[in-house]
Image: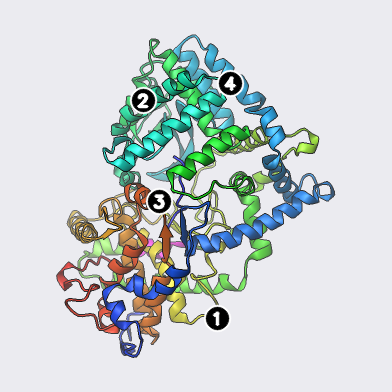
Amino acid sequence: MKKKWLSFLTAAALAFGMFAAPVTAAASEPDLAAARQDFYEAVNEEELEQMEIPADSGQVSQFTLIQDEIDAELESYIRECAANLDSLDEAGGEYQLGALYLCALDTAARDMYGYGTVVNDYLKRVENAESAEELLDICMEMDRTYSITTLIGAGYTADMKNVDENILAANGLKLPLSKAYWTGTDESSAGMRTLFHQFISRLYEINGKSAEEADRLAAQMCGVYQSLAPSQANPEDYYDPDKMYNVCLVSDLPAFFNGKLSLETFCSLYEAEPEDKVMISEPVFMAAAGSLMTEENLPLLKELVKCSIYRKFSEVSDTASLDALLAFNQQAYGLEEKESLEKAALSLVQGNLSELCSRVYVENYFDESSKEDVSSMAEEILGVFRSRLVSNTWMQEETKKEAIRKVDSMTVNVGYPDEWPSYMEQIRIIPPSRGGNLIDNVLNCNRLAMQTNIETRDEGGMDPTDWSGIATFEVNAFYQPSCNAIFFPAAILRGTFYDKDRSRAENLGGIGAVIGHEITHAFDNSGALYDEKGNYRNWWTDEDFETFHQLSGKVVDYYNGYECAGLPVNGAQTLGENIADLGGVSAVTELALSRGLELSGLYKQYAKIWATKETPEITYYLAIADVHAPSKVRVNAVLSAMPEFYEVFDVTEGDGMYQLPENRPGIW
């Protein structure tokens, strides 16, 4: 699904009666002629005219409109907790929410504590490090204890090839900004690099450097990032397990850091053995960054660590650093105003106490009746997908059986988890009235999360009902390939996506298309590489996989023919999401036909969920970094590939929505 735009820098078988209902055009509709030319604009014309991008945002969409409503609900609840903190149970979730919110708003305490005792101590140790190895030791300690990742980071995750076990994953220095900004030669990329340079320079000034020295250091940091960027993976590569699953031994790690990484320190901190396996997603990039680990580069390495810390904690430290971050976001994404302190405070609470916010949202604002209905709809759409696999003509029986097994094994999660995670009960936020400060409270949340990760490394096994990392209050939906499960958080079961009083056809065009989208992700160019348990395993015959590759190539070519706001769509970068869009809408179309429902309402609702306005800066950012096609393209390109759409709206050759039959892609 669509992810948040701002990133500083993530059924019953229906084979019979499929076409029992006649496909008719609503000829009397006044927008029919316009719909044939540009369906997205025709359906959303009035909505787009009324939409206004908030002054402190770069985008307005159906996602953000609903999210704003939910955020207002949560903010009201959290403010009430903060106002009545003394009457709340100190061990309860409401107390933690109110206390952290107060810390975020306490500007005097933020300016007094700055980076707090812990981070200031690390900064001193970094400055006093006498060798590259000592510096890496400090970096490992920061990461292992407080999840402060600078030159190295590690943690345990499910082994992609054996999800019943966990594996250690390691990474090195991470680049701020998207790769395309560092490598691009166009005006927008150069402008973003300039803004980032100014941001880093400002942080250095806040931390005691003269304007001249701050500018020099910022230029040096940006130079390093730009030199490393070509070695970084492209956006679409992160969805390709063939490229991301690289396993070696822990004993091999020092070689990635130019021999400066202490194996003894690493094993001690992360409770590993030299012969243990470790997964490295980007070995080429990690080696490139690791080549900087020399004694001659020690001053440079120290600056890279300090720069990472300044950036990482600009959101939670002093108000001058926060203002620098908000000013950068404002300029980088074309916002009229900086985000307010109150809005930033809410984001901090949501980000650091996500599970508590999730529980509050479900218990206080979620319409429980939608859960059963949407769950039933999901099972119906799964049934459609299954029947399509049964009747598939390009897959051999061997592959087809594996695909059907995957659909039959898929877990559907709607609304919220059956049980809330218990580790959150251990969090204790110290409010300002008791001497608490924001950064130390945030670090304690990080410490608990990191310790939990280490302690549970031997438990193994991916739980398809585990909602870890998925907030019920965020308007989104997910397919998790490592456990073959789909998730539809409570937040998306409202507004334009779902309304129990709306017609079934319209809900199929809204949440139904979302459900079909997530199911299809199990068979996109990335999801298709995982089996029914979530293991990264090739279950295809060679011939079928080659056919799938050819069909995927047709999707790439098709989307390469589209553009939005003058920017070409990158068909390879957006391939997985495009396959999911095409499969999802095709599946709900078939389901609607089998139920005798009117397709015009379904297609209109599908167009409505993508109504979007955004600043030019956001449009450009999404074009170079997002794996989703632009919203307008997600409507027009998808519907132009549906044969039924042509019948419903009488689209013929010469119309803007027309595509030659041989050019219309379709896999699932």
Q: How many numbered tags mark residues here?
A: 4
Q: Are marks 4 and 1 in contact (CB under 8 Å)?
A: no
Q: Name the residue under label 3.
A: 618
Residue 418 in the figure: left or right of residue 278? right
Q: Nearer the viewer, mark 4 or mark 3?
A: 3
Q: Is residue 601 above or below residue 378?
A: below
User: Mark number for residue 122?
Assistant: 4
Which corner quadrant holds the C terminus? bottom left
Q: Residues within 10 Å of mark 3 (few under 14, many from 20)?
A: some
The earlier-in-sequence mark between 1 and 2 is 2
Question: Percent from the top left, x then y, of residue 648?
Answer: 30, 83
Q: Are marks 2 and 4 in contact (CB under 8 Å)?
A: no
Residue pictured at 49% horizontal, 14% vertical: 134
- Determine the CA span between mark 2 and mark 4: 22 Å
Tag in front: 2 or 4: 2
Label 3 and label 1: CA atoms lie apart by 34 Å
Query: Which of pointers 3 and 1 lies earlier in the amino acid sequence?
Result: 1
Kindly report the distance in space between the C-alpha atoms of the residues bearing marks 3 and 2.
25 Å
Between marks 3 and 1 in the image, the one whose residue lies nearer the viewer = 3
